[in-house]
Image (tube, rainbow, N blue to C red):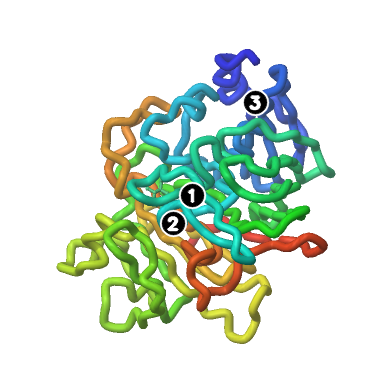
Amino acid sequence: MKKNLFMIAAAGLAGMLTSHAAVQTTDFDDIKLYTLQNKAGTTVKITNYGATVTSILTADRNGTMADIALGYNDVSGYMNAVDKPYFGSIVGRYGNRIAKGQFSIDGKKYKLATTNGANHLHGGVIGFDKVVWDAKVAGSHSVRFHYLAKDGEEGYPGNLDINVTYTLTDANELKIDYLATTDQKTPVNLTNHTYFNLKGEGEGTILGHELMIHAKGYTPVDSGLIPTGKIEPVTGTPFDFTTAKAIGRDIGKKDQQLEYGLGYDHNWVLDKGGKTGQLTLAATLYEPTSGRFMEVFTREPGLQFYCGNFLAGNLKGKSGKTYLHRGGLCLETQHYPDSPNQPAFPSTILAPGAQYQTTTVYKFSTKK
Ligand code: BGC
């Protein structure tokens, strides 16, 4: 594996693309970087290390391109990320937290690593963001990543066979299709952990971004960010994003939930309007100075909105710019945190013979 070559590929690939809707592969032994480009010139780069989105180049309202995804310019950045931001990666086997790293299935107890205080976060010590996936170009617009998580890996039961397909459409959608099967009952909750800054990575904070979340309720947490089990209405709280508002508007309000999250770091219960399991609008994000607008659609019942509270302002990103505290935000489509221990939440247990199948779409456009 020639890690440092990844940087050269990341810098050089866009210029090499001549055809639209092209998929370009650059092969550095087992680490690869794929570039998807559509007719509009939107360009998405994805590496098979962690099935990670490393870059998303989109136009602003004047047609000027910028990279709106935070990340590193070298695969070693992703490998050695001491502060563990999980930039752009697929996280799993269980995205988000499992209380005390414990759960039971059919009376049998399982113990996972506690990687976030007393709790388990994002799949453990070597989660899906830290493994090399098999990769395959799948048509003119898609790349498919495959990983077989072994029975017992990170303490989870069952061989879990996972396919994640990224597609960039000419309608400016980055579509992520997830498919998984298992040979033993196991919890599964996969998501993508891209940090967006619609002004451009390294261009200040996301506090001026206007966010709408299609959710009347959210799952409040304890001080370790484990849901209490209740679903509370957002009305009258800083968590009300039912109408678009600037993220910075209420973030400083005195509120115990904001104190626990050090800002927004919570799961919203999406209004599915009777369309459980179907692709529905979860959120919109607008950045007024650039005019960039993003819509998020998902089949999942929940959305973790995390506004980069743990970015400490000490990290330089891929273009050398400093990533400020709250310099990027994640909209992680998912089942609710700690579902394996919360019988009232929609189940995350996948059984042999069943298929885990879900889709998330990030759609890019601009507004005047
Ligand atoms: C979690 C945050 C965590 C971040 C990076 C988010 O999904 O909700 O609490 O700090 O990932 O690990």
Residue 195 on image: x %, y %: 45, 46
Residue 117 on image: x %, y %: 33, 47
Residue 222 position (above or below residue 16):
below
Closest to the observer, 64 or 84: 84
Residue beneath disc 2: 291
Q: Gap in Å between the C-alphas at discs 3 and 1?
A: 21 Å
At x 47%, y 74%, the residue is 269
Residue 341 position (above or below residue 16):
below
User: Which amino acid does the dot numbered 3 rest on?
Assistant: Leu
Mark 1 is surrounded, within 10 Å at the Cα level, by few (under 14), some (14 to 19) or many (20 or more) other residues, namely: many
At x 73%, y 63%, the residue is 351
SS label for mark 1: loop
Residue beneath disc 3: 13
Side (left or right) of 184 relative to 60 = right
Residue 191 position (above or below residue 56):
below
Mark yes or no: residue 314 visible: yes
* Label disc, if present, on residue 60 of the rendered structure: 1
Marks 2 and 1, the one that precedes in the sequence: 1
Image quarter hosting the C terminus:
bottom left
Determine the image quadrant of residue 47: top right
Mark 2 is surrounded, within 10 Å at the Cα level, by few (under 14), some (14 to 19) or many (20 or more) other residues, namely: some
User: Which amino acid does the dot numbered 2 rest on?
Assistant: Gly
Mark yes or no: residue 363 visible: no
Q: Gap in Å between the C-alphas at discs 2 and 1?
A: 6 Å
Residue 151 on image: x %, y %: 69, 44
SS label for mark 2: loop
Side (left or right) of 198 relative to 299 = left
SS label for mark 3: helix
At x 70%, y 40%, the residue is 150
User: Which amino acid does the dot numbered 1 rest on?
Assistant: Asp
Mark 3 is surrounded, within 10 Å at the Cα level, by few (under 14), some (14 to 19) or many (20 or more) other residues, namely: some
